[in-house]
Amino acid sequence: MPEREVVLGIESSCDEMAAAVVRRGREIVASVVRGQAEVHGPYGGVVPELASRAHVRTVSAVVKAALTEAELTVEHLHAVAVTAGPGLVGSLLVGLSFGKALAYRLGIPVVGVHHVMGHLAAAELADDRLRPPYLGLAVSGAHTALYRLRVDAAPLLLGQTRDDAVGEAFDKVAKLLGLSYPGGPAVAAAAVAGNPRAVAFPRPMASADGLDFSFSGLKTAVALEVERRGRGSPLSPGTVSDLAASFEAAAVDVLVARARTAMAQEQQTRLAVVGGVAANTQLRQRMAAAADQDGFEVVFPPPALCTDNAAMIAAAGFALLARGERHGLGLNAFSRVPIDAPPWMSSASS
Ligand code: KG4
Ligand code: ZN
């Protein structure tokens, strides 16, 4: 399949503009990610309108940077893979329009990729031997869900959050504790010096039936504790660390407990943990220990492939191209998309 060997991936579903060149869906030749911390930092969270405007300013330079890093020109590209959803529509449209225009100008195919399929593809990129069947736990700023990855079929959703995503909880807790944006890494850094047993925060649904998650109660418990400790005045650094560590321990407990239940129920031997929160050191360590105890294998992509990037989109796109998917200039952006039936897909499974 040499005609689709070199795929350019473009990802712009939230506040990262990313471009990557991946060969045969396996070899990352170049990967460039440009964040927008300086744009959204002052607001303590992503402002969608500002995100899309910043993307317009950077998309061309980021794609060029990826090609330069790959020591290739556009003429070497065989296809473009671009995130079409779910995400912020204004942000998605920037990468999507750029990708479609480039593919049109080069006369090469373009395929739309489901963002979470991209995250899951990162695990297969990281571990050559990983192929369905296995379970996937996607943990990011917008998603907290468990999937069964199947051979020749779309992922089957086993459970998901009923309210906040776990990354969203990290981001909101960072704000409550007065930490900088982006919140996840800031909470994790503050937690290093804290006592994870300082406050026994709730472990919502950790032992309930089913495989759903809930994080809004945990977030509210942190808000109440901040209120109780601070009474309007700033928290001491020691208290911030203790609350960060106690929150992180509770969130990680829930994710590990849910994953263990799912692995046992589904009788699977391999688990892939993907998405921005999969970069969290505590989660990586605690899940690895649980996997050891229970006798399953866990795959974490390296941190740079956990948070949003375009290498994962190119890898997922390569698999779609190999199945004959082509999406043309009519490809549109969608804020919400079921993983098993993206509307732009020509075949039934994604
Ligand atoms: O996958 P991602 O880059 O974007 C989405 O698809 O949402 O995930 C971003 C999320 C944010 O909520 C961020 O705070 C969280 O991942 N995150 C972390 C860490 N690094 C990123 N959460 C906890 N610990 C980290 N080290
Ligand atoms: Zn993501």
Image: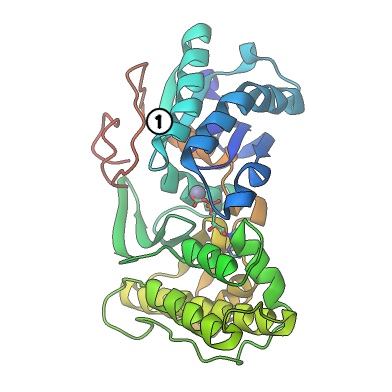
Answer yes or no: is residue 1 visible. Answer: no
Secondary structure of residue under mark 1: strand
Report whether the residue tagged 1 is closer than 8 Å to ligand 2.
Answer: no
Q: Position of residue 53 (x, y in %)?
A: 54, 29
Q: Is residue 107 above or below residue 77?
A: above
Query: Would residue 206 appear left or right of 140 to someone viewing this image?
Result: left
Residue toward you, 217 or 230: 230
Image coordinates for residue 253, horizontal then vertical, percent: 50, 81
At horizontal 29% and vertical 30% (from top left) the residue drawn is: 344
Residue pictured at 56% horizontal, 62% vertical = 278
Any part of residue 160 in sight: yes
The residue closer to the viewer here, 246 or 175, is 175
Quadrant of image for the C terminus: top left
283 relative to 195 in the view: left or right:
left
* Residue 82 rendering spot, x and y as whole percentages: 47, 30
Q: Residues within 10 Å of mark 1 (few under 14, many from 20)?
A: many
Q: Residue at x 59, y 32 (%)?
A: 54
Residue position for label 1: 112
Type of colouring: rainbow
The residue that appears at 59% across and 42% down in the rendered structure is 309
Report x, y in % for residue 41: 63, 50
Image quadrant in which you'd find residue 93: top left
- Left or right? Give the position of 133 relative to 12: left
Q: Which amino acid is tagged 1? A: Gly
Farthest residue toward the left? Answer: 348
Residue, far front: 232
Query: Up-down: is 283 above or below 250?
Result: above
Q: Is residue 204 above or below residue 344?
A: below
Near-viewer residue (4 or 249): 249
